Image (cartoon, rainbow, N blue to C red):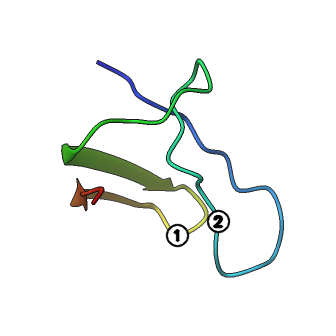
Amino acid sequence: MLVKTIVKDDQSQFVRWYLNNEKGRLVGNGIYIVYIELPELGVNKILKLVVVYK
């Protein structure tokens, strides 16, 4: 299930994500799989992201 698509379209090093899904609601606690495409480098990455709220 797709949670959020983030497109980086500037020259900065970072992208800020406010932990909201495609509908604008906060995502829940859990482990998420992050798929990153870097076409200019010809690289794709798969990472795990843990979200924990107090």
User: In the orientation shown, which residue stands out farthest toward the right?
Assistant: 10
From the viewer's side, name the closer residue of 38 and 1: 1
Residue 20, above or below 46: above
The image's mark for residue 15 is 2
> Image quadrant of residue 6?
top right
Q: Secondary structure at mark 2?
A: loop
The amino acid sitting under disc 2 is Val
User: In the orientation shown, which residue stands out farthest toward the bottom?
Assistant: 13
The amino acid sitting under disc 1 is Leu
From the viewer's side, name the closer residue of 33 and 52: 52
Q: Which residue is mark 1?
A: 41
x then y, percent, for residue 53: 30, 56
Marks 1, 2: nearer the viewer: 2
Quarter holding the C terminus is: bottom left
Quarter holding the N terminus is: top left
Q: Residue at x 62, y 26 (%)?
A: 24
x then y, percent, for residue 18: 59, 52
Q: Residue at x 67, y 81 (%)?
A: 13
Decide if residue 40 is on the left or right side of residue 43.
right
